[in-house]
């Protein structure tokens, strides 16, 4: 079958790669995919065509979203878009194949750290849309695409034909299991809060491998229980006071959810069921997920990645040495002040750690993700600082700032470290000027609480 775009170009439908109740997605020639929508009437087809036209005119620069390339010509309704043939839906990270060992599969698909990083980027995409005054409307694990290769961490939103302004008018846009209760019962239209609810479900599933409302009673009970669960009429599986919907499935929460993430889940699935204003925003999820990822490293004793604040690996029991962390601080008027939450980085031993513009710049809104410094930590021996940027880096010992070392662009410097912690501070500006800096510390695992 061949369809044509608005310029008359033929687009052969070669292979169906996805289908739902409202549309089908086909691969075409080259790196092009076709979303072919099921328009029931001419009027509904015109409405869909108008909506896609609006989306094409939106300012979505900086948002990792697959925008329409061209509209389809009548009588077909839909659009062409870039074919993401090296990406898969994030739902592939939420359910292990039946023939694979669960923990081996979890680690082999990137483990906890990669999941946290992918989800933080997805949350960043939703937050960026909300900042532009639009909502995604129907987030689900099928329309958040991620790199297929565990070594890569790209994220892209697809199926953007429902992107729109917030609406108080009830809409039929709702994916059961991810739609907020107020959408399912018609109390509200799509909002930033309904987007945040859907994202919270996705994040919980990807990290824990359990749906927040599918307890054992639901999965093994009558079909109507599923509707009650999705509409928020049952307690969520980790409700502290109501165990009626507990589940034996999924990974232990304390192993994969830092305390801040458990708090955000509670605010979403408990406090925020009836009160949408009580839910955390996509921006809050982004910050918490990024912070958790920054404090997650590979375990030296097993394939899993773990929160470095845990006293031992929860998977294999290894008690590793106290890890080194880089704490980001501001320097204004000569006095250091703590940076915003989420600015503490675990430094992996024996591996280079990139410090990006997101971490080092004073501007908290605009940032560059290119490395502005590299750190290499040889546990108990030395810390190497490499400067790939165009400006010098300044190093001073702590707390004595009399000595000053400069790492010139394209150069590196090895600093000695005592057995307690490196004595040096990496500064992204000359002393005496406003700048950010990295102060190093060792996390005492025996005292840490994730």
Image (tube, helix red, strand yellow):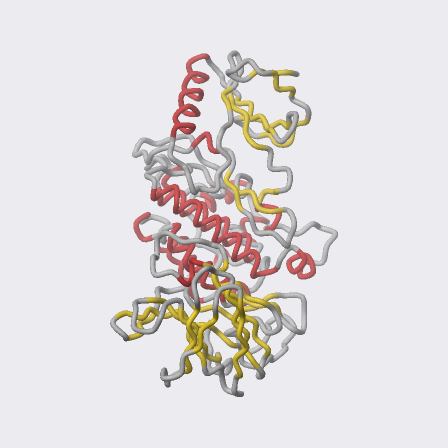
Q: Position of residue 219 (x, y in %)?
A: 57, 49
Question: Which image quarter is the N terminus in?
Answer: top right
Quarter of the rendering containing residue 44: top left
Can you see residue 50?
A: yes
Above or below residue 272? Residue 361 is below
Q: Position of residue 378 (x, y in %)?
A: 59, 78
Front one among 99 and 114: 114
Above or below residue 423? Residue 59 is above
Above or below residue 437? Residue 124 is above
Above or below residue 265? Residue 447 is below
Quarter of the rendering containing residue 361: bottom left
Residue at 72% from the left image edge and 54% from the top image edge: 100
- The residue lying furthest to the right in this view is 99
- The residue lying furthest to the left in this view is 333
Q: Position of residue 252 (x, y in %)?
A: 56, 64
Can you see residue 240?
A: no
Front one among 441 and 383: 383
């Amino acid at each position: 079958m061949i369809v044509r775009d608005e310029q008359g170009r033929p687009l052969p439908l070669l292979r169906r790669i996805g289908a739902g109740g409202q549309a089908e997605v086909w691969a075409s020639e080259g790196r092009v995919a076709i979303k072919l929508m099921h328009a029931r009437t001419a009027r509904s087809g015109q409405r869909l065509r108008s909506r896609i036209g609006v989306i094409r005119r939106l300012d979505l620069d900086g948002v990792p979203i697959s925008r329409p390339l061209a509209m389809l010509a009548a009588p077909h309704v839909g659009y062409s878009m870039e074919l993401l043939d090296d990406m898969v839906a994030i739902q592939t990270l939420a359910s292990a194949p039946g023939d694979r060992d669960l923990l081996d599969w979890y680690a082999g698909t990137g483990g906890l750290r990669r999941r946290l990083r992918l989800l933080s980027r997805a949350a960043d995409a939703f937050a960026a849309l909300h900042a532009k005054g639009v909502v995604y409307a129907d987030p689900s694990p099928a329309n958040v695409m991620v790199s297929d290769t565990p070594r890569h961490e790209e994220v892209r939103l697809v199926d953007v034909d429902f992107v729109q302004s917030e609406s108080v008018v009830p809409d039929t846009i709702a994916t059961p299991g991810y739609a907020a209760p107020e959408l399912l019962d018609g109390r509200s239209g799509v909002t930033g809060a309904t987007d945040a609810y859907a994202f919270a479900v996705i994040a919980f599933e990807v990290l824990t491998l359990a749906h927040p409302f599918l307890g054992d009673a639901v999965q093994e009970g009558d079909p109507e229980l599923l509707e009650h669960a999705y509409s928020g009429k049952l307690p969520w599986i980790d409700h502290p006071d109501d165990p009626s919907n507990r589940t034996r499935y999924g990974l232990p929460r304390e192993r994969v959810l830092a305390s801040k993430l458990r708090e955000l889940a509670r605010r979403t699935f408990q406090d925020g069921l009836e009160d949408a204003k009580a839910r955390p925003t996509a921006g809050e999820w982004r910050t918490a997920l990024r912070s958790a990822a920054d404090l997650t490293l590979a375990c030296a004793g097993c394939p899993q990645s773990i929160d470095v604040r845990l006293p031992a690996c929860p998977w294999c029991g290894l008690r590793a040495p106290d890890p080194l962390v880089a704490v980001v601080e501001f320097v204004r008027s000569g006095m250091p002040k703590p940076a915003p939450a989420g600015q503490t980085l675990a430094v992996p031993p024996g591996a280079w750690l990139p410090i990006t513009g997101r971490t080092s710049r004073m501007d908290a809104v605009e940032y560059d993700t290119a490395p502005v410094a590299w750190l290499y930590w040889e546990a108990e021996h030395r810390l190497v600082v490499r400067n790939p940027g165009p400006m010098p880096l300044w190093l001073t010992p702590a707390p004595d700032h009399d000595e000053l070392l400069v790492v010139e662009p394209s150069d590196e410097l090895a600093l000695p470290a005592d057995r307690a912690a490196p004595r040096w501070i990496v500064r992204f500006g000359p002393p005496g000027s406003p700048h950010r800096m990295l102060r190093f510390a060792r996390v005492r695992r025996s005292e840490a609480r994730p």
